Amino acid sequence: MKFRLVYIVHGVVFLLLLFCIIKGFYEFHDYYSKAYSFPESFNKALYNNRIGIVFLLLLVIGVFLKNKTGWVFLTTYFYFVLWFLLFSINQESLNNFVDIVFFLSFVLVVAILLIIMNLEKVSFGFYKIDKNNSYGINIISCTLGLCVLTLLFLSKNIYFLNL
């Protein structure tokens, strides 16, 4: 089996999946140790991680699909993270050097993953996306990432809409 650049992206996706699974177990244990019943603890932990679970399912599906759909799932998530980072910048969040370095390194990692996904070796060689089609699909992925971010912000701030 020959090493490909896309395997770096797949490895990051599986690390994210592992992180979310461990986080879910810790939250479940925390609720269970507060004298909640087993089903109630499971439901609370599942409810708190519902958005992350949906995103990770799409990412894992994107890893196993070797077509345009898989590529769109992966790049949409990375664009979502990039848009989220850009829209979450405020003066209080970047008030010391460590926060700035952490933020810039996270943006750099996401940008590198997007660059890897847009390389011709990955987009054409692995996902069979033609170079002429990749620009349009990239715009669609970027727009989908922004739409998902907008829906996430609206779902968290729905009480401001007075509906």
Image (cartoon, rainbow, N blue to C red):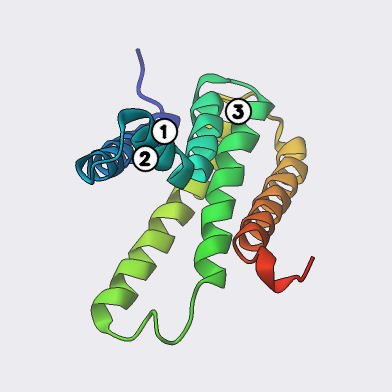
Q: In front: mark 3 or mark 1? A: 3
Question: Of marks 3 and 1, which one's residue comes earlier in the chain?
Answer: 1
| Residue 91 image point, x, y percent | 44, 87
| Residue 136 image point, x, y percent | 77, 44
Tell me if residue 116 can be seen.
no
User: Where does label 3 land, which residue?
Assistant: 70
User: Where does label 2 land, which residue?
Assistant: 16
Residue at coordinates 67% horizontally, 62% vertically from top-left?
154
Which is nearer the eye, 42 or 75?
42
Tell me if residue 40 can be seen.
yes
Q: Are marks 3 and 1 in contact (CB under 8 Å)?
A: no
Question: Of marks 3 and 2, which one's residue comes earlier in the chain?
Answer: 2
Does 157 sit left or right of 98 as displayed? right
| Secondary element at tag 1 | loop
User: Where does label 1 land, which residue?
Assistant: 5
Cα–Cα gap, marks 2 and 1? 18 Å
| Residue 129 image point, x, y percent | 68, 29
State which quarter of the image contains the C terminus: bottom right
Q: In front: mark 2 or mark 1? A: 2
Amino acid on which disc 3 is placed: Gly
Amino acid on which disc 2 is placed: Leu
Question: Of marks 2 and 1, which one's residue comes earlier in the chain?
Answer: 1
| Secondary element at tag 2 | helix
| Residue 84 image point, x, y percent | 54, 62
**Res 14 → quadrant:** top left
